Amino acid sequence: MADKNNRQIWFDGRKVPPERQDIWSLINNSPIQKIVVHSEQRRSEKYPLKTELIIEIKTEEDLDVVKSGETALSTDQGLLDLAKKRGCQTCICISVSGKEALEQSWQDALKYDYLIVDFDLPTNIPLELIIARLQDSSTVLLKQVTTFTETEVVFGVLEKGSDGVLFANTDIDEIMKVSAYLAGQDVGNIDLHPLTVMEIRNIGMGLRACIDTTAMMAQNEGMLVGSTSQGGIFVCSETHYLPYMNLRPFRVNAGAIHSYIWMPGNAAEYLSDLAAGSKVLCVNTEGKSRTLTVGRVKMEVRPLLLIKGEAAGKEINVIVQDDWHIRVMGADGSPKNASLIRPGDQLLAYVCEPGRHVGIKVNETIIEK
């Protein structure tokens, strides 16, 4: 099984007609690199150099269009065995109906590099069983899907999820959604910088937002929140000692509602615009990030605290609730109580080029104070 943070999405291009250049143009300009085609497409059509083709073979003659090192896909194990002898990677495609077919499918899959599986019923139970059977094997498991929503569900089964999906849909909007998902995976580590606090003061009452997610965060995790588009300060998850209430490890008490919060794909959103189902970036002290889903946003009037500082030559500020139980991350990886921070303290911050319109990075002159 593959790394769950490196999901594979194969695009099924076998039913895309040549005249649908809008689809191929979108694929060409997306992070999608693996495309399944049939042998006739391979013979007659050209694909971008970045593309890794998986070629469906139905006859022994079809093997002639599969180059050594490329991947042959088939339901016929005899043809796949021939492909393996020719130096090709192999992908077995199996439709499962019933318990006996399920048991046979994972045993057959162990002989090949990839398994694409489809089921006769919409339940995820058979997928869970195959994930469990293949978890210690080198076979890469993909589930056939037709929507982005189904893709998200498949990647969440048994927490581990399948290694990938074969995405079979020619709807432009759906393709854009899976492209955005892959782009979010490619964010990688985020560069965090030490921020020297220059000013801290109470600025009166205002609305602050708590971000409650559908996941649990660790003590070294939090979110990036800032008043301007040129960066944010690491606000900790609610996983640290509270004397009068239970911890809320799914929560970040994030900041004033006008604030930016960073999201996948180098996007940012106002805290006030988040809602159930929104995606936000969870970051740890090493800069490793993951995507979390918002369960709810809770806004309440509270006393507010301005924290202003400098990181990597840029001035950054955040406004959070003025209370001891709010934690922001110190540059040394230790949380600091917001109300005890003083000028000269070192915090952890994210710095980026300023300039955003509806949360998307744009190249224009923007001055924020």
Image (tube, rainbow, N blue to C red):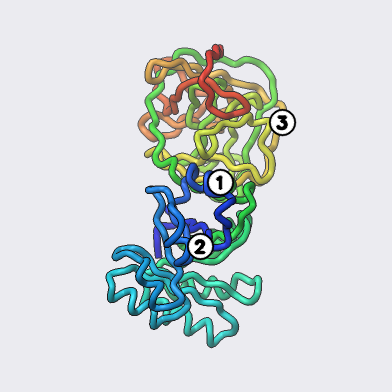
Q: Are the residues flagged by discs 2 and 1 in contact, CB closer than 8 Å?
A: no
Give me the residue at 47% from left, 84% from top: 104
Dot 2: what SS? loop
Give me the residue at 46% from left, 39% from top: 283
Q: Nearer the viewer, residue 148 or 24?
A: 24
Q: Are the residues flagged by discs 3 and 1 in contact, CB closer than 8 Å?
A: no
Dot 3: what SS? strand
Spatial separation of the CA atoms under disc 2 and disc 3:
37 Å
- 196 is higher (above) or lower (below) than 169: above
Residue 109 seen: yes
Q: Quadrant of residue 141?
A: bottom left
Give me the residue at 53% from left, 59% from top: 13
The kind of residue on which mark 2 rests is Gly
Question: Which residue lies most toward the front here?
Answer: 44
Residue behind mark 1? 292
Spatial separation of the CA atoms under disc 2 and disc 1:
16 Å
- 325 is higher (above) or lower (below) than 45: above
**Looking at the image, is mark 3 or mark 1 earlier in the sequence?**
1
- 262 is higher (above) or lower (below) than 63: above
Q: Residues within 10 Å of mark 2 (few under 14, many from 20)?
A: many
**Looking at the image, is mark 2 or mark 1 earlier in the sequence?**
2
Residue behind mark 3? 300
